[in-house]
Amino acid sequence: MSPKLTLISHHLCPYVQRVAIALAEKGMAFERVDIDLANKPDWFLKLSPTGKTPVLVVDGQPIFESSVILEYLEEVGPNPLHPADPLERAGHRGWMEYGSSILSDISGLYNASDAEGFAAKSDALRAKLARVEDRLPGGDLFDPKGLSLPDAVFAPVFRYFDTLDAVGDIAGLGHMPKLARWRAALSARPSVRTAVAADYPARLKDFLLARGSHLSRLMA
């Protein structure tokens, strides 16, 4: 009997999105429960020591931290998203961590209070994405053999730029053709599209405008 899976979510969280993508690609049924991270319910704080999303509740047992959840799903679920070879698998894990560091730079970008800080974060993003461009084989996916967990990690990264592109080519993606192809291919996948609500772009825009940051002023 399959376990009951409940994904505790925040509607904008990119770390939730990567778990939702993996669950969809594996064909594992789950219920999704959104919470307000600005007003965290007591029941959630009992599940998550960090107070962060996502949390995956498996038959009443919580698992926190997205990377841990993804590894658990690999152990128990069908349709593996990690390569079988241990060395290749370790390489994929490294690029997943790299994707998380890019998310941190994006957070720094939309929270930068002035033009100088914004430019520094923009430069950092360009440099990191250029390294990914160099690594990519040039196809539709991170690994030519099929969709893998780095795809699930980077799809939410690219989703930010669907909104940020209205300001300009902040991270230089217009000069990275392999990333552009990968981004387009991921955005077309049902698992990626359904990882967020239909009104996600409007919600993200409202969130960014409300930051009171340099980016907020550029967007306004």
Image: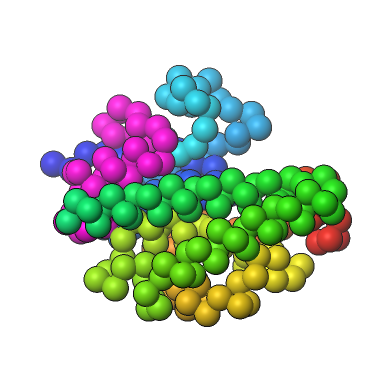
176 relative position to 110: left or right: left
Q: Residue at x 41, y 41 (%)?
A: 66
83 relative position to 195: left or right: left
Q: What stretch is highlighted in magenta?
A: 56-84
Q: Residue at x 28, y 43 (%)?
A: 71
Residue 34 rendering spot, x and y as whole percentages: 52, 41
Give the tally of numbered discs. Answer: 0
Note whether 100 is above or below 41 in the view shown.
Answer: below
Compare residues 204 and 120 and report the one nearer the observer.
120
Note whether 133 is above or below 119 in the view shown.
Answer: below
Compare residues 28 and 169 and report the one nearer the observer.
169
Q: In which quarter of the image is the N terminus?
A: top left
Residue 157 rendering spot, x and y as whole percentages: 54, 58
**Image color mode:** rainbow
Question: In the image, is residue 67 part of the stretch drawn in magenta?
Answer: yes
Q: Which residue is drawn at 26% across and 32% down?
A: 59
Note whether 67 is above or below 219 in the view shown.
Answer: above
Q: Quadrant of residue 4?
A: top left
Residue 187 rendering spot, x and y as whole percentages: 48, 70
Residue 117 rendering spot, x and y as whole percentages: 78, 49
Question: In the image, is residue 24 part of the stretch drawn in magenta?
Answer: no
Residue 190 appears in the rendering: no
